[in-house]
Amino acid sequence: EYTPAAAAHEWENVQCYHLLMYRTDAAARYVEAKPQAVYAAFLDPELLVQWMPPGEMTALLEDFLPQVPGGYRMVLFYGNQKEKQGKSAPDRDVVDVQFLELVPSCRVVTAVRFESDRPEFREEMVMTWEIRDVEGGVEVGITAEHVPPSISRGDHIAGMTSTLAKLANLLEE
């Protein structure tokens, strides 16, 4: 039987479950570069496809619009990896990225959503990239909020760490 109190209790249960399901992951790295160079790497499509794909993945960039509102669609290919478990297809992930905030040389905030037939991967994550000026370079930090539990924490942090390493390698050449 429906009562407002029962409905409110049910909604509280849903909200609690929702809060328990999602998590925040983070990674950071020192990069020997100027803040302007790091920020520019987010807005240059030729650079972005070189450093953003995690691990051994490669990328194709589509519909790139570097402004708020704006964003891009990136197709990430697994290549020769033995175990292919793509979110969009067996050999790939397709991700739609929307720029939420662009603060030159300081911060890039994006909403990220995987294209997938599986609902456990379609939830939107918010990725905040902080660029902090430190002696001799910058610290680049990534905070991923609302990470679905279907994405392994270990794999996600390893992917973010490898992305940061690729960014450092690109800019420190």
Image: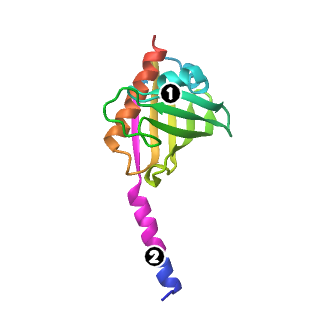
Horizontally, is 97 left or right of 172 in the view? right
The answer to whether residue 136 is seen in the rendering is no
Nearer to the camera, 61 or 129? 61
Image height of 123 relative to 87, above or below: below
Q: Residue at x 44, y 20 (%)?
A: 168
The answer to whether residue 170 is seen in the rendering is yes
Mark 1 falls on what kind of element?
strand
Amino acid carrying label 1: it is Ala
Stretch in magenta: 10-29
Question: How is the model colour-coded?
Answer: rainbow
Q: Residue at x 50, y 78 (%)?
A: 8
Give the residue at mark 2.
10
Give the residue at mark 1.
59
Of all residues, the one furthest to the bottom in this rendering is 1
Quadrant in which residue 97 is drawn: top right
Looking at the image, is mark 1 or mark 2 earlier in the sequence?
2
Amino acid carrying label 2: it is Glu
Quadrant in which residue 28 is drawn: top left
